[in-house]
Amino acid sequence: MALPARSRLLELTKLQCSIFSTIFNPTGERLGNKILRQRLKGPKLAAYYPRRSATVEDVMNEFKKFDLVGENEDEAERLEDVARAKLRGKGAPKKKKTAEESRFNKRKK
C-alpha cells in the first residue's frame, strides 16, 4: 500500500485544524500557542497570597485599646542576643557622627 501524497496530508491537517479550532502549522515552528492558550495566572496568584498579614505589633496595638499589656518574646530574645554580642565585641560598629570620625577620611590625609 502506497503512502498518501504530502499535499493530501496537508489538506487533511488543514481541515482538521479548522474543525477543531487549532493552529495550522505545517512547518512545525515554535509559535507559543501552548502558552497563549493557558489561563492567566495573575488573578489566581494574587488571590492566593494575602495582602498583608497581622504582625505581633498589630495585635499589641489592639490590646492597648483595652489597657492590656503584652510582650513580643521573639523581639525581646533578639534584643538580648544583640546585647550579648555587643558585650563580646561582635556587635555592629557605632555610626560615625561627623566626617572627622570616619576611618576613610583618616586614611586620606
Image (cartoon, rainbow, N blue to C red):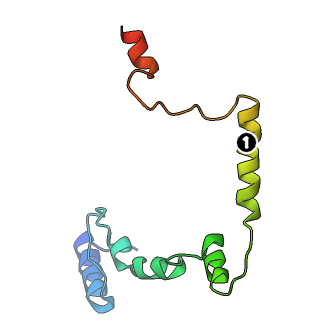
- The answer to whether 30 appears left or right of 78 in the picture is left
- The answer to whether 55 appears left or right of 41 in the picture is right
- Image coordinates for residue 1, horizontal then vertical, percent: 40, 74
Residue at screen point 25% across, 81% down: 14
Instruction: Name the residue carrying label 1.
Output: 83
- Image coordinates for residue 61, horizontal then vertical, percent: 61, 77
Q: Quadrant of residue 67?
A: bottom right
- The answer to whether 14 appears left or right of 67 in the picture is left
- Amino acid at pointer 1: Ala
Kindly tell me whether residue 2 is visible in this rendering: no
Residue at screen point 75% across, 45% down: 81
Rendered position, 29 above or below 80 = below
- Image coordinates for residue 72, horizontal then vertical, percent: 72, 66
- Image coordinates for residue 46, horizontal then vertical, percent: 46, 78
Q: Nearer the viewer, residue 18 or 53?
A: 53
Q: Quadrant of residue 22?
A: bottom left
Which structural element holds mark 1?
Answer: helix
Residue that sits furthest to the bottom in the current view: 19
Q: Nearer the viewer, residue 92 or 41?
A: 92
Q: Quadrant of residue 98?
A: top left
Residue at screen point 66% across, 75% down: 60
Q: Nearer the viewer, residue 20 or 95?
A: 95
Q: Quadrant of the C terminus?
A: top left
Q: Nearer the viewer, residue 38 or 97?
A: 97
